[in-house]
Amino acid sequence: MTHKMNTLVLTLLLGSALTGSARAEPASDVSFSFRAITWSDAPLAGLTIPTAGNPLVIDAPVNQRSRAYEYRGDPTVEIYPGKDMTDASPVGQFVAGPNWSQVLLFLLPNPRGGDVKVFAMDDSLSAFPPDTVRFVNLSGKTIAGFLGNQKVVLENMDDKQLSAAGGAAFLPIRFAESSSEQGGWKRFLSSAVGVNKGMRTLIVFYPGSADNQRTGKEICYKLFYDYPATSSSVVAGNTQR
């Protein structure tokens, strides 16, 4: 009887140890294709991303998508300032979703140097289909607005999308930032967005440069249009309030 009890205790202990070991295993590698964009004064060149194979050296052009890069590795993706990662610390990172296949990275370098703010979004057609307008808020502020009669509220580092499948060639767009000075909201954008059938529209809000802010343009925006069926893309936009 004692022998059987000892065997039972040993079996339970081994089972617990194996279960604990299974929990401690690292997350499975992920793989996806990605492109990068920056809004710095010059392209970000020579950034390095460790992968399960050879490191990726990437370039992020200004105001347009980079070429496609293929990543396979840990879901937590680290970005280093150069090729030599021996004693370097990452300047930015993001966590990839488990089912992401195509990713768009927004890289906003700190004007004072050092870190890079990274926002990653699922850019696949299932997550961002044609006939939609997607908003990405990198401005550092809470903003709210309307696309036609559809309302959207965006916290900082947030993204949401609205349907543009109503058949109109243009939709009015109005946005305001949260402002304690003006007792609620301060409008910074009033315009119209082209929404041709089959097109994806991406609107990105980001902090204005020092020159922009001196003239009151604290939040700027860019519009990106693309037609997934042809893989062609056009970038447009400006730094108006």
Image: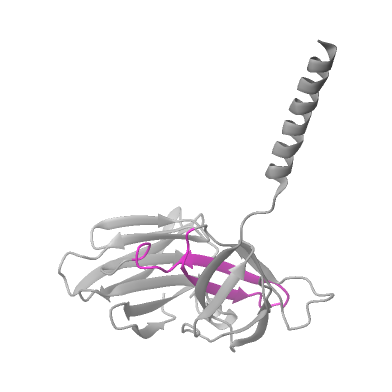
Query: Going 31% across and 60% down the picture, which residue do you hit?
Result: 162
Quarter holding the C terminus is bottom left
Side (left or right) of 235 relative to 62: left
Image side of residue 224 versus residue 97, left or right = left
Q: Pick whichever, 69 or 220, lies toward us.
A: 69
Residue 138 visible, this angle: no
Does residue 134 lie above or below 19 as drawn?
below
User: Is residue 83 visible in this depiction of the protein?
Assistant: yes
Q: Is residue 72 shown in magenta?
A: no
Tag count: 0
Image position of 99 (left or right of 126): right
- The quadrant in which residue 91 appears is bottom right
| Magenta-highlighted residues | 99-128
82 is higher (above) or lower (below) than 89 = below
Image quadrant holding the N terminus, namely top right
What residue lies at 48% left-to-right and 57% top-to-bottom? 142
Query: At which x and y percent is residue 143?
Result: 44, 60
Q: Residue furthest left?
A: 167
Residue 115 covered by magenta stretch: yes
Q: Nearer the viewer, residue 227 or 44?
A: 227
Q: Of residues 115 and 183, which is closer to you in this image?
A: 115
Residue 129: horizontal and vertical position, in percent?
A: 31, 66
* Residue drawn at x 33%, y 79% as measured from the top left: 226
Q: Is residue 78 above or below residue 233?
A: above
Colour treatment of the image:
one colour
Q: Position of residue 87 (x, y in %)?
A: 84, 75
User: Residue 170 appears in which quarter of the rendering?
Assistant: bottom left
